[in-house]
Image (cartoon, rainbow, N blue to C red):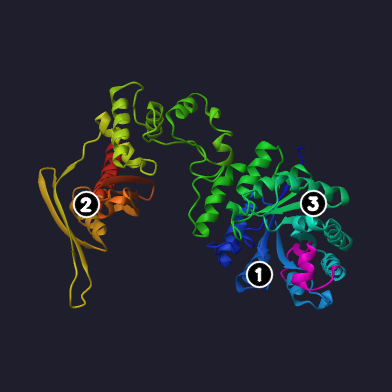
Amino acid sequence: MSSAVQIYDTTLRDGTQGEGFFLSGLDKLRIAKRLDEFGIDYIEGGWPGSNPKDIEFFKAAAKETWKHAKIAAFGSTRRADIAVEEDPQVQTLLEAKTPVITIFGKSWELQVTEVLRTTAEENQAMIRDTVRYLKEAQREVVYDAEHFFDGYKEGPEHALATLKAAVEGGADWLILCDTNGGCLPSEVAQITQDVSKAFPDVKVGIHTHNDCELAVANAIASVDAGATQVQGTINGYGERTGNCNLTSVIPILELKMGRKAVNDLTKLRDLSFFVDDVSNNPHFARAAFVGRTAFAHKGGMHVNAVQKLARTYEHIVPGAVGNEQFILVSELSGQSNILMKADELGLPLQKGSEEALTVLSQVKELEQMGYSFEAAGGSLELLIRRALGTCQRPWSLEEYHCSFRQYRDGHRPVCEATVKLEIEGDDAYTVAEGHGVVNALDQALRKALVPFFPEIESVSLIDYKVRILDGEDATAAKTRVLIAHTDGASTWGTVGVSDSIIEASWIALTDGIDLFLQRKKSEI
């Protein structure tokens, strides 16, 4: 099949039900605009009237011009034993002024009798009345059949009767929801097929949750069986273990199944990172398609093969989803890893050369000591530069000293560092206080170097991480320190390992500054 699949994004509603995922009204609008540019067909903004942020979003959305997407308001059917015109929740859906309204209703008889505490007949009337009322208001209506698969497996006649009620009301879409996330792909496929046969003139969609790590697989199974809309969230955010991950489903639809879904798939990784950044969540490095390591190669044999023919270990071209190949260097590396990394850096390392073998040997020795270069590409670059003889530190250390002083009189504790360097034949001796020992060291080092290398003023330390490598050795354990620097244009990471956290920090800190100076020197 080559027909398009409609993508319905519920990041702004279902996604925000996930732990640790928070969005302001402005955040929602920013994400909605990016989703629209990306080519998402439907953007569910939230539940109008449920909270101030959603009210703010729908007011702002009504003033926007949307290039592609339709904005949807989300709510439920009317309450039991009340006229639809008198239900205030239904009225707020119309007041949101969205072209699409999505409502959910109960498909599982257990939910009808035990949660709603009403009859099957009244539940069907609630669905039918609400859909009809919204259609009379000239809205496109998406009907989410909550707990449909559980309900169908326990009582197919009742579940199908609820869908029939939605169809009688005039629903544009029937969305089958695996609300508990407990179904298998084979079940989803068969039930989707049954529904498509029962209602051949109505469009069917799928909404899955990830409680069994099958949300994406279940969505794909449903599409294979006839569904033409997939609901989900960017990066799989959502309640419990999350919703169907659109950053996985969309490339599968387009690249594996030939089903058109969005405008430009190459923007997928950028969108994924954007949503993480706006919601202040760390990006999942091992995410399929968009993760930092999705096309990362570490084993020497793998890298050697990829160097010759990338598709031997890459199921798609990374650029198709906006990602890129990433060669890791570790104790598992072969010469190919080192050569490809050097080529990325523009450093002239030749295959079989003494320098290449030296770098490889040093990497393996250092990793044995506890070093890791996967997040410390700056340290690896320095290692290659030093092997090539193109790197010479323009200063030398004579001594450094750190102290922490605690006063009895309530005076705040003081962290102090002194640094003595030899620079261009002169001694530079500086003292600095800081918020902690490493910050004091950083300040003292900068005070010593800036008079000789003023360009260092543009460099700032942006990340500092510590890992204990041999926890069983308690306070005598080795420590690995990772530091990230930026000059505003690029970012680089360096690593230090030592029995002393201060020495490990000093190694990573000075390597970060040293690399910056070496790069500046190369530009001259």
Camera-side residue: 18 or 264?
A: 18
Residue neighbourhood size for the residue with mark 3, other residues' Cα within 10 Å, grouped as few (<14), some (14–19), many (≥20): many
Q: Which residue appears farthest toward the front when viewing the image?
A: 472
Q: Nearer the viewer, residue 458 or 516?
A: 516
Which label belongs to residue 59?
1
Q: Position of residue 266 (x, y in %)?
A: 59, 42
Q: Answer above or below: position of 503 versus 329.
A: below
Q: Which mark is residue 204?
A: 3
Q: Is 55 one of the magenta-colored residues?
A: no
Type of the residue with mark 2: Val
Distance between mark 3 and mark 1 Cα atoms: 30 Å
Q: Secondary structure at mark 1?
A: helix
Give the residues in magenta: 96-120
Give the side of residue 18 with respect to residue 178, left or right: left
Q: Residue furthest right?
A: 168
Q: Is residue 226 left or right of residue 512?
A: right
Say whether disc 1 or disc 2 marks the residue closer to the N-terminus.
1
Secondary structure type for disc 2: loop
Query: Mark 3 against mark 1, which lies toward the viewer?
Result: 3
Which residue in the structure is indicated by mark 2? 450
Amino acid identity at mark 3: Val
